[in-house]
Image: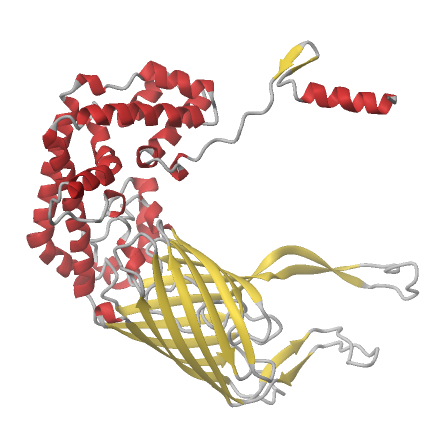
Amino acid sequence: MTIRMFLLVAFLAIASAGSTKAHGQEVTPPAAAKKDFCSDSREDVKAYCKDLNDLQDKINSGATEAQLRQILNKLDLSHPVATDKFVTATATRALAAATARAIDNVPKATASTAMADAGQARRDQQLSAGHNASGTTSLVSKSGSAELLSLALDTGALTKSVNGATITLSTNADQIFRLVTGSDPDCTVTCKNSRFEELVLSRTNVFATLDAAQQSGTTTISSGQASGTTPSGVNNVTIPTGVGKLSGITARYQLRNNFDPRSKTFQDNWREAIRGEVSTAAISVRDATIAVMKSLTANPALALDRSEIERRAKSDRSGATLADYFDNYFSTASEQAFQEPALEVDVLQAVQSRAMYRKAWFDALDQAAGTLLTLEYNYNRPLNQPFTHNLKLILGYDFGIRGTLTFNGAVSLYDSVPPAAKFGRVHYGQVSTQYDRTLSGKDRSVQTQLSLAGYWQYQPEPSVLNIAAGTLVPGTDIPLPNGTQEFVGTAGSLWVTQAKLTIKASQGISVPIGISWSNKTDLLQGSRVGAQFGLSYNFSSLASLFTGGSQ
């Protein structure tokens, strides 16, 4: 065996030993990655996953006993604050047991989806960029937007000639105002707004669109040769300063949108529901939860061994040991708790009441169906083309469970027209329409929405392409010192059709996937088939992190 082979074998033996000593001190292998409790398949671990995550993080950071007390209360079945999640964790078990005994009229909705975000059912929200962005999944603009803040990442092309990647940030002026002033940005139907908030801020939404494929740069004076093979000198060079360029700013004002929880129509429908079904469901939820809590807290045998759960969490920083210990504790404690026959009935009642409360919210949303009307202004800054001002009218009508139909009518004007230009101020006019319908049940945590859209644009002149100063005339070495503008593409009609499927997951996540056909694009002739896909996240559900607000 050679010396090199001997050293290799020795190294592998040392590496597999579990720990070594370096400079006289023991070196422990790096800990395994921390477990995500919310992805655990066990119902009890998943129900209490946030509290288990918090406990493991606190222990890993060396928290004191006082800092752990509140988290441990939430995991202790004998403590009142653990009751709500106990109902969630045992709902499936209680339903299965009741079904086995042929109990009729048991609701099939579990507590884990009972209070899901109703905003995911809205078909009016516009979270991504409009059709004129270089990469977008939206052919038609809708009347609504994010409640607090939305981030959308889109890729593809609809009416542009070049694929692109677009980042869109959208927000509501009133929600930002509330966040900055310390008010409750998550408060919707239970808050009273000032007239200025109601008529101006709550109806105003702002979008910022950035083209991720563009690079911003600066030109600086230089001297010398570009390379040893290039005899001519270089007088200036362009240095990249960043990736991602602001390609457009959009402001929209909602004249009428009954789906917005801040609107008077929605609030009136909600107050009407509160006087009836919602009030009954809320009282039922309270009473059933209190009954479950009394049953659990009256049994001292259900108490959590807090010293032991801390020891288990400290012994394994990854959280796997903590998850196994909690699952074993919960299984044993719940088996003992369900020895009391009345507990199963109380859990079923709590699940049913939660489902009733959720259904009442959707009923209020359905009653708000009707006309939607929004005005939109967009300052568009496309790459290598003149800047434009775009004015758009968005008109929609919601038919309830039958879907929503949206119409757009817009005109685009050039920002400025050079004195010697051969084109006028009007860039184009366009009309478009889109039909949206939810394919899956609106009460599901993951929803699918089908969209069918058609778009027509008329340009009196071909599109204008800006050629930067210093660009060579094609086929020559003659530079264009002052830059120039050239007509590209053709004038006339541009037709686009699109079919899109949007997958709406929980917590405000949406994934649009579309395919489109066009007879040409803004800059190029010839028909085109393309695909678009994106990802958006609506941060409205995170508002309570700042102020502790609630719906």
Examine the rendered structure and indicate whether residue 495 appears above or below residue 74: below
Q: Quadrant of residue 298?
A: top left
- Residue 282 lies, in percent from the top left, at 12, 45
Q: Is residue 182 above or below residue 526?
A: above
* Residue 521 appearing in the image: no
Say which quarter of the image contains residue 368: bottom left
Give the image quarter of residue 212. Answer: bottom right
Vertical side of 108 occupied by 306: above or below: above
Q: How is the image coloured?
A: secondary structure
Q: Residue sitting at 40 percent across and 34 percent down?
A: 37
226 or 445, which is in the foreground?
A: 445
The image shows residue 20 at horizontal and vertical percentages of 66, 15
Residue extending furthest toward the top: 24
Front residue of 33 and 423: 33
Q: Does 349 sit left or right of 160 as displayed?
A: left
Quarter of the figure with the N terminus:
top right
Where 482 falls versus 335 (above or below)? below
Q: Residue at x 57, y 76 (%)?
A: 386
Q: Find residue 458 and report its horizontal and vertical position in percent.
A: 48, 87
The number of numbered discs placed on residues in the rendered structure image is 0
Lateral position of residue 464 relative to residue 367, left or right: right
Q: Is residue 290 left or right of residue 140?
A: left
Question: At which x and y percent is residue 499?
Answer: 43, 73
Question: In the depicted view, which residue is nearer to us: 547 or 110?
Answer: 110
Tell me if I can see residue 437 in this picture.
Answer: yes
